[in-house]
């Protein structure tokens, strides 16, 4: 874990080094990912069967074994404890309600002799990648699928890696609750390739969303253009701003809530209190010893964790904006006022009673968020990721005569004679 102090003359280079430390490993897998995508394009279903046997430790009897049917989903739901299904319903209802409030309205702007407008439509089909492997994430199913369904996407296809052929029952229950229309037990770059290019059994989609490992992230990068994507998701991260009045144990566990995701995750504390810096560091060490995922969280904290001691919150805000974190927690005396000064964060959690984990499950806003400082220009998943805009114009003869001459002048200035003539010939009639 790194400790930096803005009073240190070397703070500038040290902070730059922290920003520049690469946790994204997609560059190391670009070659193997390209090979996987090429195989799926060339061999289709046969490649999916072979790659599943190779990477997921089970041999499907045929392509039908990769498709999850309605009976399997119903059986999975029956195996879930009632309190888990009830918790899914609480989360789903809140996520649906928040995303329904985002839905934009079509626009019509009338003018003299013209009508200008903008119409929103959903994509026809969306592919959702749901992580598997180290952990099962039914919450990610809800966060990816529900905005798509709220937006009006008709076909929602989910792929999920299934080590040894098994899908956790709660993941399938979440898919059913979220209105997923197809579920395939396929993971990795081969799943992204199948969603983008299609096979004999899997029709291609228009947009692919959802986080995954380095192979998934690189595959999304390589298929972009063939299909749309939400983002290139990197390791999870949190920045916690905490003052001296906070309980260091809460600060510590909020940092570790991100560190336990994986070894490449990053948790950073920014504080204006030397006492808090010391107490939080000690509390992290104490909390680590009792975590079920201690090894993962410890590796993350020791390799990528940091505590930044600042003179005041003016410095703290400036550093936070340079970090542009995926998640931001404000554990300070006046969190709303401090939040008003911060420009760049994927999602913010304001005040001591709002841990980031609340947003992972039941708060309502999406937990698929920009990582790796991309919150400077990107936003979290929403209905807008599944919508597209079509602008339209209609004109009367009087409307064309009102604005057409200016268009003719500009077209002639650009040397585009057909452009100019297509308008001018109507003006002469």
Image: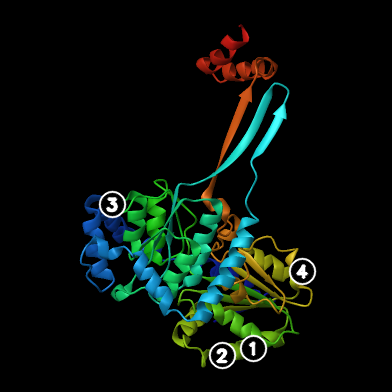
Cα separation between marks 2 and 3: 48 Å
Q: Mark 1 — residue?
A: 249
Where in the figure is residue 194, as x and y percent of width and height? 32, 55
Cα separation between marks 4 and 3: 50 Å
Q: Earlier in the sequence, mark 2 or mark 3?
A: 3
Q: Mark 3 — residue?
A: 199
Q: Are marks 2 and 1 in contact (CB under 8 Å)?
A: yes
Q: Point out the frontmost of discs 2 and 3.
A: 3
In the image, taking residue 266 as reference, residue 9 lies left or right, namely: right
Mark 3, secondary structure of its residue: loop
For label 3, count other residues whose C-alpha is less than 10 Å away and answer few (under 14), some (14-19) or many (20+). Answer: many
The answer to whether residue 354 is seen in the rendering is yes
Q: Mark 2 — residue?
A: 287
Q: Mark 4 — residue?
A: 336
Foreground: 374 or 101? 101
Q: Earlier in the sequence, mark 4 or mark 1?
A: 1
**In the figure, 251 relative to 412: above or below?**
below
In the image, taking residue 229 as reference, residue 29 lies left or right, namely: left
Q: Earlier in the sequence, mark 2 or mark 1?
A: 1
Task: Say which mark, if any, is on residue 228.
Answer: none
Where in the figure is residue 400, as x and y percent of width and height? 65, 17
* Quarter of the image where one finds residue 255: bottom right
Q: Earlier in the sequence, mark 3 or mark 1?
A: 3
Cα separation between marks 4 and 2: 28 Å
Cα separation between marks 2 and 1: 8 Å
């Amino acid at each position: 874990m790194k400790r930096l102090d803005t009073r240190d003359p070397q703070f500038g280079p040290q902070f730059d080094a922290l920003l520049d430390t690469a946790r994204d490993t997609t560059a190391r897998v670009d070659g193997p990912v390209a090979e996987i995508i090429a195989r799926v394009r060339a061999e289709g279903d046969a490649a999916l069967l072979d790659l599943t046997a190779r990477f997921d430790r089970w041999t499907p009897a045929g392509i039908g074994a990769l498709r999850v049917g309605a009976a399997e989903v119903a059986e999975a739901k029956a195996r879930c404890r009632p309190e888990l299904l009830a918790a899914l319903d609480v989360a789903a209802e809140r996520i649906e309600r928040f995303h329904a409030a985002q839905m934009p309205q079509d626009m019509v702007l009338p003018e003299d002799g013209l009508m200008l407008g903008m119409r929103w439509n959903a994509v026809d089909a969306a592919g959702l990648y749901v992580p598997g492997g180290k952990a099962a994430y039914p919450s990610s199913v809800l966060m990816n699928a529900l905005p798509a369904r709220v937006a009006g996407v008709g076909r929602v296809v989910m792929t999920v890696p299934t080590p040894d052929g098994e899908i956790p029952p709660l993941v399938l229950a979440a898919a059913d609750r979220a209105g997923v229309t197809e579920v395939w037990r396929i993971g990795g770059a081969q799943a992204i390739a199948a969603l983008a290019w299609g096979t004999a059994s899997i029709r291609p989609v228009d947009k692919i969303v959802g986080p995954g490992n380095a192979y998934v992230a690189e595959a999304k990068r390589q298929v972009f253009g063939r299909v749309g994507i939400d983002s290139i998701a990197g390791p999870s991260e949190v920045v916690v701003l905490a003052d001296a009045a906070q309980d260091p144990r809460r600060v510590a566990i909020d940092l570790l809530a991100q560190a336990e995701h994986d070894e490449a995750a990053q948790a950073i504390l920014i504080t204006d209190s030397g006492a808090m810096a010391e107490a939080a560091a000690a509390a992290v060490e104490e909390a680590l010893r009792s975590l079920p995922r201690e090894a993962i969280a410890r590796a993350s904290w020791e390799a990528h964790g940091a505590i930044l001691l600042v003179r005041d919150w003016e410095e703290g805000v400036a550093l936070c904006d340079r970090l542009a974190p995926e998640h931001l927690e404000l554990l300070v005396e006046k969190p709303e006022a401090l939040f008003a000064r911060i420009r760049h964060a994927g999602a913010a959690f304001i005040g001591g009673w709002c841990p980031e984990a609340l947003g992972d499950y039941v708060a309502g806003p999406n937990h698929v968020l920009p990582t790796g400082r991309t919150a400077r220009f990107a936003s979290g998943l929403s209905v807008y990721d599944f919508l597209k805009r079509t602008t339209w114009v209609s004109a009367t003869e009087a409307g064309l005569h009102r604005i057409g001459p200016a268009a003719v002048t500009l077209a002639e200035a650009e040397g585009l004679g057909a452009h100019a003539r297509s308008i001018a010939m109507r003006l002469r009639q």
